[in-house]
């Protein structure tokens, strides 16, 4: 089973910015950036909300083309689509990640680590 992801040319700036206007989704992107190169399971986002709420936010990120979700049995492994976003909108993801690093939820996670 695989989940639908937009092609590179289907990723729009307006949609990316709209999806990242939510602090929970912005925090998820910041968390993924801290763990870049490693796919993160859904369970690692429990700090950001309930399972139902997280499923909604992760779907929005995937549908906008910001993340890639790989189905592995009953798990979902999430990663940033950095290469695609950097190719489509150079410098945008770095700016977004810099803003996300200042969110209280990420600061709390860094303090606990």
Image (cartoon, grey):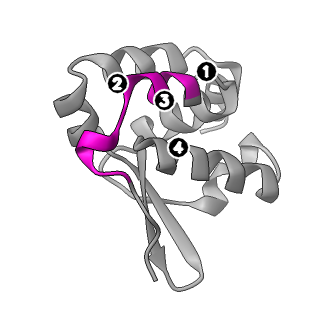
Q: Which residues are magenta?
A: 6-18
Q: Is residue 51 left or right of residue 99?
A: right
- Asked which quadrant contains residue 22, the reply is top right
- Mark nearer the N terminus (1 vs 2): 1
SS for dot 3: helix
User: Which quadrant holds the C terminus?
Assistant: top right
Residue 4 visible in the current orientation: yes
Mark found first going from the N terminus, 4 or 2: 4
- The residue that disc 4 covers is 61
Q: Residue at x 56, y 75 (%)?
A: 75
Image x and y of residue 65, in percent: 40, 44
Give the image location of residue 61, x and y in percent: 53, 43
> Would residue 110 be visible to someone looking at this image?
no
The residue beneath circle 3 is 15
Q: Does 89 appear above or below 77?
A: above
Mark 1, residues whose alpha carbon is within 10 Å: few (<14), some, or many (≥20)? few
Residue drawn 17% across the image and 32% down it: 87
Q: Are marks 4 and 2 in contact (CB under 8 Å)?
A: no
Between label 4 and label 2, give the one nearer the viewer: 4
Q: Earlier in the sequence, mark 4 or mark 3?
A: 3
Residue located beneath label 2 in the image: 93
Q: CA distance from mark 3 to mark 2?
A: 14 Å
Answer whether labels 3 and 2 touch (C-beta < 8 Å): no
Crowd tier of the residue under label 4, counting other residues whose Cα lies within 10 Å: few below 14, some 14–19, many 20 or above: many
Determine if the magenta segment contains residue 89: no
In terms of secondary structure, what is the magenta stretch mainly? helix
């Amino acid at each position: 089973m695989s989940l639908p992801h937009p092609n590179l040319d289907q990723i729009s700036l307006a949609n990316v910015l709209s999806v990242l206007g939510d602090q929970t989704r912005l925090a998820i992107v910041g968390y993924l950036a801290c763990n870049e190169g490693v796919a993160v399971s859904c369970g690692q986002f429990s700090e950001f909300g309930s399972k139902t709420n997280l499923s909604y936010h992760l779907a929005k990120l995937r549908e906008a083309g910001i993340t890639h979700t790989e189905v592995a049995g009953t798990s979902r492994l999430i990663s940033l689509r950095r290469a695609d976003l950097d190719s489509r909108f150079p410098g945008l993801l770095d700016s977004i990640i810099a803003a996300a690093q200042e969110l209280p939820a990420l600061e709390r996670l860094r303090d606990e680590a």
